[in-house]
Structures are given as structure tokens and as C-alpha cells.
Amino acid sequence: MPRPTKFRRVEFVPEVTVFKPAGVPLRALEEVVLTVEELEALRLKDLEDLEQEECAEHMQVSRPTFQRVLESARRKVAEALTQGKAVRIEGGTYRVAMRRFRCPECEQEFEVPYGTGQRGIDMSCPRCGAPRVYRVDGDAVRGPEGRPCRWQQRGHGGPDGPPEKS
């Protein structure tokens, strides 16, 4: 009996999920189904140009598993392109990776999925409505463009956030 498939971590879930040859109605086409984790493998390796070991770490799978997912994805895309088939992106065994944010005003922490296009500088706190929130990465809090927040750059605060207000 085969082992159950582990969930793969993905950072991007597409809004557009069907691609087809121009000028041909979708109902007249055969489809190739590309899973969300296969798309993530293509994105990491072919678009982000990461090494396979890095890709595997991102997806939280072994390197051989990543290689199998990538080969399957490339085969399906090649089939669709060479045989004039539509590509539908759906399904798979995955979990969407989350980004963690913190409000410097009320200390509220919350998560937002990757791939939303939202940056902390563009978000407001869901609890107090403060106009800016900051990214929390493990022990570091990140400001806009991924740099440490101003109060961390000045040696204040630390992994727990800005200094207490008096």
C-alpha cells in the first residue's frame, strides 16, 4: 500500500485557472489538468530560477519528490502546447503558505496568504485600523521591502516588537 501524499507548501494560487489556444471555444478542446503544486514547482524552478534543493525546501518536500512534481508539470505543459489542448489549474495536495504580520500600535498578529499581492505598507490592522502593519519573519519583524523595521534598525525593541509606549 503506497504512503499517503504529504501536503506540499505553495506560496502562489492563481486567480486565472484556465489557459487555451486563441480562437477555439473551450468546449471544443481537450484539457490537461495541472495541479496547484505542479504550477508552484514550475514557478519556483523556471520563473524564480531557484536551485532544486531550494525549491524543495520552499515546498517542504524532498528533492526527489520535487523533481517528480516538476517533471509531471513540464510534461503536461508540453502536451498542451504541442497538441493544442487547454490547461486547467486545479486540485492537488497542498497548503497555502501564510505570511505573518504585526501591528505596532495594538500588537495584534495576523496571517495573510502568500500571493495576494498585499504588502504590510498597504494593509491596515484588522483590530485597531492602524494604517501600517509589519511583516513578522521568525524572530525578525520586517518593514516595507523586507527590511527590518525602523525601530529594529535603531537597536530598539527586538523580536517582540517596538518598545513600550510611555
Image (cartoon, rainbow, N blue to C red):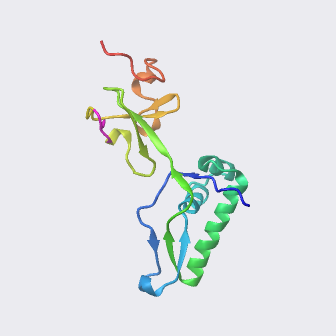
In-front residue for pair 141/108 = 108
* Residue sitting farthest toward the top: 166
- Span shown in magenta: 123-127
Q: Is residue 150 above or below residue 51?
A: above
Residue 165 higher or lower than 140, as above or below: above
Quadrant containing the C terminus is top left
- Residue 27 shown left or right of residue 42 in the figure: left
Q: Position of residue 128 (x, y in %)?
A: 26, 32
- Relative vertical location of residue 37 with respect to residue 135 in this rendering, above or below: below
Q: Main secondary structure of the magenta part?
A: loop
Q: Residue at x 54, y 72 (%)?
A: 33
Q: Given the current orientation, which residue lies at the most extreme left position?
A: 129
- Find residue 91 and report its horizontal and vertical position in percent: 52, 64
Q: Residue at x 31, y 36 (%)?
A: 125
Left or right: 72, with 81 as reference point: right
Q: Quadrant of residue 154?
A: top left
Q: Position of residue 115 (x, y in %)?
A: 44, 52
Foreground residue among 133 and 107: 107
In which quarter of the view is residue 17 placed? Answer: bottom left
Quadrant location of the N terminus in the rendered image? bottom right
Let me know if residue 71 is in the magenta part. no
Residue 125 among those drawn in magenta: yes
Residue at the spot 58% in from the left edge and 55% down from the top edge: 44
Q: Position of residue 123 (x, y in %)?
A: 32, 41
Which of 150 and 119 lies nearest the eye of the viewer?
119
